[in-house]
Image (cartoon, grey):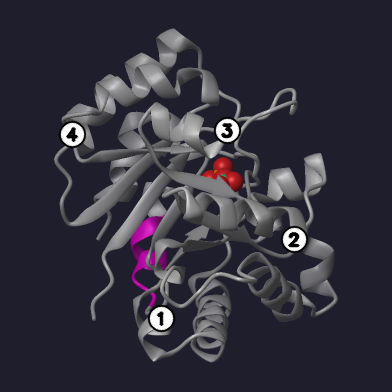
């Protein structure tokens, strides 16, 4: 089965209400009718509502950058899956490297969020990826394997295709250093094989695995042309409509 490419923009902690609206206005013009590629944008929590309304009649889907695993209650500063669904989110990024390495999220915490997102009808984008020191110590495969296994613990074969995996080598995020297409492909192939062992052939054939880390219009086609790379999770280049559109339309 051919897998449809999926390109998601992770705006991180950027934009203002005004600049978010301006960016979305341009994106609707440029990629709002995209049908060859699935497109999502993930603005900061505070702009989800406004951005969500602007993309309602487009083919651009809304995603959040994080969530908590409880329904509601005394969890100051956290956001629940139902709140995200309320404002129109379809996707939620979980386990992004900045949450793992800046905020300190563990594989176990991320797994609880993945399970909760699926239960509540949100599609997780589960991010995995090694640090530079781990790559240099030849631990890339071991680290990524652990992140995938623990991140998906308890996710059934019936639910796992709701998940997109994003392989993002930490040393390539925001640094301008992209993994070479061959380096990325090698890890993607390992992840796909692992998912085949954890689940079945249908899962390994069908699940989408995005690459992330300094993806730009100029390198997107070669990366997304690799057999096991099914799209991109884009940070910096998702903040300029023309650059993001260049990635969506890369071939
Ligand atoms: P980058 O970020 O494209 O700015 O490297 C990617 C990401 O962190 O998702």
Residue bearing mark 4: 58
Residue numbers of the magenta segment: 219-226
The answer for how far apart the CA atoms under marks 4 and 3 are is 22 Å
Q: Which residue is mark 3?
A: 12
Image vertical order of residue 25 relative to residue 83, above or below: above
**What element does badge 4 sit on?**
loop
* Mark 4 vs mark 3: in front: 4
Specify which label sits upstream in the sequence, 4 or 2: 4
Q: Position of residue 148 (x, y in %)?
A: 63, 71
Which residue is tagged 1?
Answer: 203
Whether 146 is drawn above or below 129: the answer is below
Disc 3 under 8 Å from ligand 1? The reply is yes
Q: Residue at x 43, y 24 (%)?
A: 48
Q: Secondary structure at mark 1?
A: helix
The residue carrying mark 2 is 107
Which residue is situated farthest in the top direction here? 18
């Amino acid at each position: 089965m051919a897998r449809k490419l999926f390109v998601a923009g992770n705006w991180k902690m950027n934009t203002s209400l005004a600049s978010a609206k301006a960016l979305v206005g341009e994106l609707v013009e440029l990629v709002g009718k995209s049908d060859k590629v699935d497109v999502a944008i993930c603005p900061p929590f505070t702009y989800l509502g406004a951005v969500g309304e602007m993309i309602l009649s487009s083919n651009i889907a809304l995603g959040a950058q994080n969530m908590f695993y409880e329904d509601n209650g005394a969890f100051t500063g956290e956001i629940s899956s139902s709140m995200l669904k309320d404002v129109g989110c379809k996707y939620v990024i979980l386990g992004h490297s900045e949450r793992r390495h800046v905020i300190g999220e563990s594989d176990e915490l991320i797994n609880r969020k993945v399970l909760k997102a699926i239960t509540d009808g949100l599609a997780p984008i589960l991010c995995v990826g090694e640090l530079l020191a781990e790559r240099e110590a030849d631990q890339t495969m071991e680290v990524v394997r652990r992140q995938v296994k623990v991140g998906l613990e308890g996710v059934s074969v019936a639910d796992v295709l709701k998940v997109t995996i994003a392989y993002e080598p930490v040393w390539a995020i925001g640094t301008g250093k992209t993994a070479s297409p061959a380096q990325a492909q090698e890890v993607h192939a390992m992840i796909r094989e692992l998912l085949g062992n954890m689940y079945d052939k249908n899962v390994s054939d069908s699940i989408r695995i995005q690459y992330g880390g300094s993806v730009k219009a100029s390198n997107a086609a070669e990366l997304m042309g690799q057999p096991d790379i099914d799209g991109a999770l884009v940070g910096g280049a998702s903040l300029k409509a023309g650059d993001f559109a260049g990635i969506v339309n890369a071939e």
